[in-house]
Image (cartoon, rainbow, N blue to C red):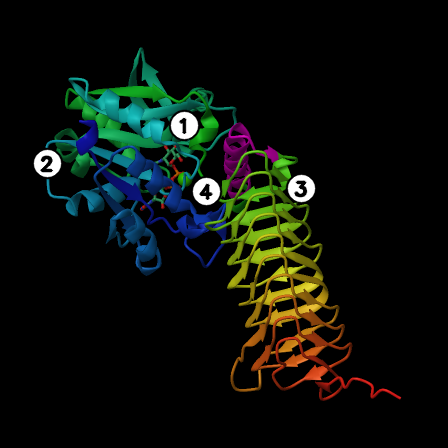
Amino acid sequence: MKGSARAIVLAAGMGTRMKSSRPKVLHEICGRPMLWYTLRALAAAGVRETVVVTNALVDPRVAPLLAEFGARSVIQEPQLGTGHAVQTGLRALPAESGTIVVAYGDMPLVTTHIFSDVLEMVGTSGIGLALATARMPLPSNFGRVIRRGEAVEKIVEERDCSGEERAVNEMNAGIYAYDEPALRAVIDELRNDNAQGELYLTDTVELLIRAGRRVVPVECADYRLVLGVNDRIELANARAILNRRLCDEHMRAGVTIVDPATTYLEPDVAIGPDSIIYPNTSIGGATRIGSQAAVGPNVRISNAIIGDGVQITESVVLDTQIGPHVSIGPYAHLRQGNVLGSDVRIGNFVELKNSTLHAGAKANHLSYLGDSEIGERANIGAGTITANYDGVRKNRTEIGSGASIGSNSTLIAPLRIGDGALTGGGSVVNRDVADGERVAGNPARPLEKKAPL
Ligand code: UD1
Ligand code: CA
């Protein structure tokens, strides 16, 4: 039954072909560990409980990921093959009469409907196993699906294939829906008499048939949905496919992406209609972009909330909130914790950190604004620096609305510059400036009115 299925996800293999100190299933694709995609698809298919089979190295590192999906793990030591991994997973699940889905943690391109399809099929009476298959161009290192009519007769691993079997182009995708009692009845009969000396999960096919159950294939329309990632070349190929899929979703929803091949997106990104993304742009994390925005070329954005009609070119924007119709760049660096009101303008070589700029404020050239609050329509002249760090503490700078900060001003925090105040070019301001006051010099002093002659 679809709603009540449980799942075992295999992720204990060492992934030796990755040549990595990082476990294979934790290598990232579009900002998420590979395993995340399998878990997401399973959750969306309505699987109610998932056990991930890990090893001692992987286990502590997958904990946050499992928490996100309410899944748990079981350690398989040593790793004696995919069949042994499922034996280990089954021991962590109290026996029931439902369906067990088995999937591998190294197939990030898998979609929810592949799981739904095998789940639906296994519900049919007499079927012990429904497994996903795909027609693939040869050569391929996938296990070959050997059929007898409409049913599967056996799966033969590439290394164990005869010449004739190797020419078969229907592959075992690695997605299975088992009738649980049928699986439990045969799983301990697996033997390791094969090229790798492992217990192959795929041998359950012949064991189930011998036990009088049917094994049926569920053919996927597109083999690219089930590509496994075993080395870094396959990792790059999978990333390109997944990224293209993300771009396509946004384009269908009304976003123009000038060059999907050089636009790098992550799954949680949201972009409003009629926005345009120019080439060589990465948008990641929980970024939300409004409509009619123009982003790129050469922009990197992470975890930003960006309003309608915003323009950003050649810049880096991290953990920042940006109001409507703001213009940023080229060559600006917005580090964490900034809030920009509507119509703010940030120009070239400006760095912002933990700063709030209210509506219409401008910092057009060569500035560092850190731990600051800039009032409405204030103008920050070229080369202005907030000296926010006194060697011990980060101090705040407040600049009032309509203030005019002269070029090359150094603002030594903590400091408050009043509404409508002015600093002259080259000022070093180390004391508060009152509303409407005009100061200049080093250290900055009030500008005296010339005495009448
Ligand atoms: C497997 C299938 C093959 C299928 C292919 C699809 C078997 C024997 N072969 O081959 O028919 O076409 O996937 O991608 O199942 N793992 C464990 N414990 C182990 C061994 C492996 O958890 O002891 C995990 C791995 O981490 C991996 C998954 O099982 O996520 C598959 O193992 P892998 O070695 O990649 O199998 P393939 O050779 O790709
Ligand atoms: Ca694999």
Position of residue 453 measured from the top left corner of the image (x, y, whole percent): 89, 88
Tell me: 190 left or right of 423.
left
Residues packed near mark 4 inside 10 Å, few (<14), some (14 to 19) or many (20 plus): some
Q: Residue at x 41, y 54 (%)?
A: 23
Q: Considering only order in the chain, which callout, 3 or 1, is on the residue closer to the N terminus?
A: 1
- Residue stretch rendered in magenta on the structure: 234-256
Q: CA distance from mark 2 to mark 1?
A: 35 Å
Q: Nearer the viewer, residue 186 or 111?
A: 111
- Element at badge 1? loop
- Element at badge 2? loop
Which mark's residue is nearer the viewer, 1 or 3?
A: 3
Q: Nearer the viewer, residue 252 or 198?
A: 252
Q: Quadrant location of residue 7? A: top left
Residue wearing tag 2:
96
Asked if the beta carbon under badge 3 is closer than 8 A to the nearest atom of ligand 2, the reply is no
Height in image: 275 above or below 283?
above
Q: Considering only order in the chain, which callout, 4 or 3, is on the residue closer to the N terminus?
A: 4
